[in-house]
């Protein structure tokens, strides 16, 4: 591959991405469900331009995300579970979330020069947060079994998933530890969505939702001393100082011998690899005022500074490392 080809590939990558994101935002896949539809029908139902829709639909055909037979555009059956609003665990929430990210990324030069994302939390808005949590639901399902396999659950009676979002990991723990007390801790706006998702399964209904702004408030009294606390994909959204303060609060909430497991997209010491973690830091720059990706040592240091002991970590997939801390038995 020549340098120009590589520059071409990287700089043009946004086109295919934005075609898919626009189609998801416009709910085109729902409109093509069943017998499919010609462009006139889609234009009529959406009030959109025939020219615009035809060009976008043809590009989706070129990307092999839908098909065309004469004038009739149709979904490809293999993508329908991901792209239809009614299908359980669909991928549309992730696509809508990525479209919001895209708007921020379009201003990256400005954000880089200012050093932080523009004011106004994207996820403070209800619809945006709902999409985000549903996106996390789809993503965390894919890794829940592997992640929970790597937690030492044998002696565990009290478990909290902090910033647990849709509560998928806790449901997996609930199935394996029928006697354990389980707490899903998150912001009220997220718990609204989580309660809805948890109410669908017996394991989910055993989980108690606890509202706690981890970074702004003391731990709520209703949380008992914890044998296990999971903090998955949370610390990358905050500053090192904020995380250090959080770890001090968590130390006080752990039972003697209790474990704090941080699951994160950890970056290597040089902060340039793995590439996914280095690029993810840019996403945190675009979306938050102080977040980035952290090294395992940085995370362990926040814990050691407040009294935790470090235990060996491990990678469970290409973007998730488990960093382990334990409160000494005393
Ligand atoms: C990237 S999601 C991760 C969700 C889940 N832990 C997972 O790994 O799939 C971040 C979660 O942290 C929660 N969160 C962010 N800031 C928080 C805060 N200050 N207090 C409590 N939860 C917070 C969000 O609501 C969201 O559920």
Image (cartoon, helix red, strand yellow):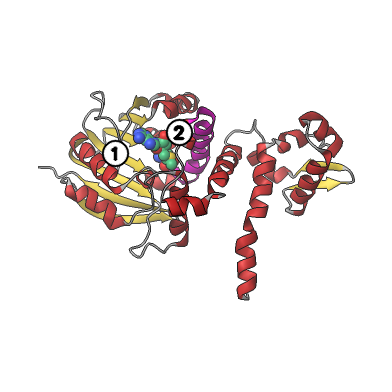
Q: Mark 1 points at which residue?
A: 229
Question: Considering only order in the chain, which callout, 1 or 2, is on the residue closer to the N terminus?
Answer: 2
Residue found 86% across the figure and 35% down from its top: 40
Image quadrant of ligand 1 equals top left
For the residue labelled by badge 1, is the local secondary structure a helix, a strand or a loop? strand
Residue 224, image x and y in percent? 23, 28
- Dot 2 alpha-carbon crowd within 10 angstroms: few under 14, some 14 to 19, many 20 or more: many
Q: Where is residue 319 in the image (x, y as percent from the top left)?
A: 44, 54
> Quick check: 327 left or right of 31?
left
Question: Which residue is situated farthest in the left direction here?
Answer: 330
CA gap between label 2 and label 1 equals: 16 Å
Which residue shows up at 44% across the image and 36% down it?
A: 168
Q: What stretch is highlighted in magenta?
A: 125-144
Q: Which residue is drawn at 46% across and 27% down?
A: 198
Q: Can residue 217 be seen in this view?
A: yes
**273 shown above or below 172:** below
Residue topped by disc 2: 166
Q: Does the magenta stretch include residue 133?
A: yes
**Depicted 215 relative to depicted 200: above or below:** below
Residue 181 shown left or right of residue 329 in the figure: right
Q: Is the magenta stretch mostly helix, strand or loop?
A: helix
Marks 2/1 in contact by CB < 8 Å: the verdict is no
Q: Is residue 6 magenta?
A: no
Would residue 147 be found to the left or right of residue 9 on screen? left
**Residue at far bottom of view:** 2
Q: Could you say whether the residue bearing mark 2 is in a helix, strand or loop?
A: loop
């Amino acid at each position: 591959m020549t340098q120009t080809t590589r520059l071409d590939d990287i700089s043009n990558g946004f086109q295919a991405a934005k075609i898919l994101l626009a189609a998801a935002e416009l709910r085109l896949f729902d409109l093509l469900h069943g017998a499919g539809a010609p462009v006139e029908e889609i234009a009529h139902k959406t009030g959109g331009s025939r020219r615009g829709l035809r060009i976008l639909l043809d590009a989706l055909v070129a990307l092999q995300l839908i098909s065309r037979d004469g004038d009739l555009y149709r979904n490809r059956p293999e993508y329908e579970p991901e792209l239809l609003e009614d299908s359980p665990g669909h991928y549309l929430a992730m696509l809508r979330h990525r479209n919001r990210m895209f708007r921020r990324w379009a201003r990256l030069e400005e954000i880089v020069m200012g050093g932080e994302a523009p004011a106004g939390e994207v996820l403070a808005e209800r619809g945006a947060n709902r999409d985000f949590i549903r996106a996390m639901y789809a993503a965390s399902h894919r890794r829940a079994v592997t992640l929970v396999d790597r937690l030492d659950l044998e002696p565990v009676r009290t478990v909290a998933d902090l910033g647990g979002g849709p509560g998928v990991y806790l449901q997996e723990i609930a199935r394996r530890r029928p006697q354990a007390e389980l707490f899903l801790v998150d912001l009220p706006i997220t718990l609204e969505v989580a309660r809805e998702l948890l109410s669908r399964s017996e394991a989910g209904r055993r989980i108690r939702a606890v509202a706690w702004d981890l970074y702004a408030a003391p731990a709520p009294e209703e949380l008992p001393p914890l044998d296990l606390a999971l903090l998955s994909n949370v610390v990358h959204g905050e500053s090192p100082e904020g995380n250090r303060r959080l770890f001090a609060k968590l130390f006080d909430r752990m039972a003697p011998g209790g474990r704090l497991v941080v699951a994160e997209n950890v970056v290597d010491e040089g902060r340039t690899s793995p590439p996914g973690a280095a690029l993810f830091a840019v996403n945190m720059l675009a979306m938050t005022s102080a977040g980035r990706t952290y090294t395992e040592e940085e995370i362990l240091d926040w814990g050691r500074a407040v009294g935790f002991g470090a235990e060996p970590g491990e990678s469970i997939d290409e973007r998730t490392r488990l960093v382990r801390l334990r409160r000494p038995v005393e």
